[in-house]
Image (spheres, rainbow, N blue to C red):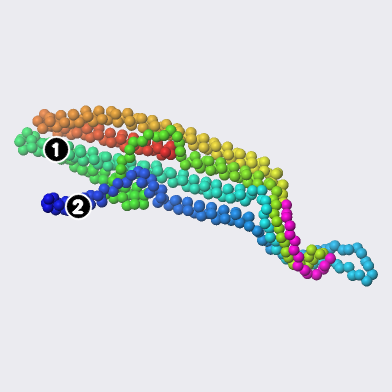
Amino acid sequence: MKGFIVISLLLLPVVFVQAQQEAILTLEECYELAKSNYPLIKKRELINRSKGYSIENAAKAQLPQLNINGQATYQSAVTEIPLSMPGVEIPQLTKDQYRIYGEVNQSIYDGGTIRQEKESIRISAALQEQSLEVELYKLKERVNQLFFGVLMVDEHLMQNQLMEADIKLGLKKVKAAIKNGAALKSEADILEAERLKVIQRGIELVANRKAYMEMLGMFVNTRLDGNVALEKPTPSITPATINRPELALYDFQLQHIAIQENFINARNKPKVDFFFQGGYGRPALNILNPGFEAYYIGGVRLSWNIAGWYTSKKEKAILQNNRLEVASEKETFLFNTQHKVRQEQAEIDRYQQLLRSDDEIIELRSRIKTSSFAQLENGVINTSDYLRELNAEDQARTNKILHEIQLLYAQHSNLNTTGN
């Protein structure tokens, strides 16, 4: 028991180091990291901040509005009273007049203009945010290319190791045959040269993996070294529905057009407000008093700008054209997306069919390789014949690796195309 405890304590650091080295990164995690670290994401905060400021400014139109005005005028004639009475001095207005006053206006009914302005601000902000979502969604395809590129290299590295192991096994048998005088030294040289070629291929694959990981690390804002492994995603079935963010963008565009149409209707409605004006001038309200005096006036004002009726019909026609244009763009987008989905589905079907025959080819090539290894061991064939069969099996396994990763990539590209 003491010995078991001592061995366990000695193995703890090894287990801890292995746990540290087994950092797993999934495709979904890469999506989230790339999205959260992309510089464009900062724009979302700016959009929300701008929306808040704009809505606050629009709401302030409902508060009392204060205007201060002043004027000094000289006019060529003034109102005169055509009377003349002995002993009575009738006041006359002066041709130079002065006035300074302030006016407070409080909207009572604005036809819904402020409410429509607020809605327009909200929809515009939502439209900008959705445009941002569309841009961020494009990151998925770039992440897919790098992620599956690393998976492809990993599979090739594993196959390269198997190939090297097979060559070493054949080399061991040939060296034994050389010692026994049953084979020439050149036979071992051929296998050794092939083994070095496999090592070179492994060096290139490791360099390619490092390059892919560095580029992927730039997107996820994380240093990805050789201790980070990528988890192979499971095969997926693409739903028939299309849920791309562009569709929501088109919906927001149509909502924005509807708000603009409502704003035209609100703008052409009558407005009612309360006003109070107080000032100081000459003359004041009593025009018969030629001196300076203070005054005030208050009441309810009705205003109705009917000039908008002249242009509202054409403005709504322009909005209707914009609505039809958005509908056409949406229809075109759906058509192109569905066409791309069908193409990708055809690719998926092709890779699935190829994989069904890959297993049969590998099984046959494996049997042929095993037989050729026995023939090499017995001196029936030479190393060139053995390498030919070894390379044939390696090519068969490489084809399967290629088709497996291509199938996964096509499936997840199809998910990305449909937005699911």
Looking at the picture, how far across and down is residue 75, in whole percent?
A: 80, 63
Q: Residue furthest bottom?
A: 87
User: Residue at (20%, 38%) from the top-left corner?
Assistant: 163
Q: Residue furthest right?
A: 86
Residue underneath mark 2: 12
Magenta run includes residue 300: yes
On the question of residue 391 being in view, the answer is yes
Question: In the rendered image of this protein, does residue 40 appear above or below residue 386?
Answer: below
User: Residue at (78%, 69%) from the top-left corner?
Assistant: 292
User: For the residue carrying disc 2, how many other residues have a C-alpha within 10 Å: few (<14), some (14-19), or many (20+)?
Assistant: few
Residue underneath mark 1: 169
Looking at the picture, how far across and down is residue 230, in whole percent?
A: 30, 44
Three-letter amino acid code at the position of disc 1: Leu
User: Residue at (78%, 67%) from the top-left corner?
Assistant: 282
Magenta residues span 288-302
Is the stretch drawn in magenta largely helix, strand or loop? strand
- For the residues marked 2 and 1, what is the alpha-carbon distance in whole angstroms? 35 Å
Q: How many marks?
A: 2
Q: Is residue 193 left or right of residue 350?
A: left
User: For the residue carrying disc 1, how many other residues have a C-alpha within 10 Å: few (<14), some (14-19), or many (20+)?
Assistant: few
Q: Earlier in the sequence, mark 2 or mark 1?
A: 2
Three-letter amino acid code at the position of disc 2: Leu
Image quarter of residue 63: bottom right
Looking at the picture, how far across and down is residue 66, in whole percent?
A: 66, 61
Depth-wise, is mark 2 or mark 1 nearer the camera? 2
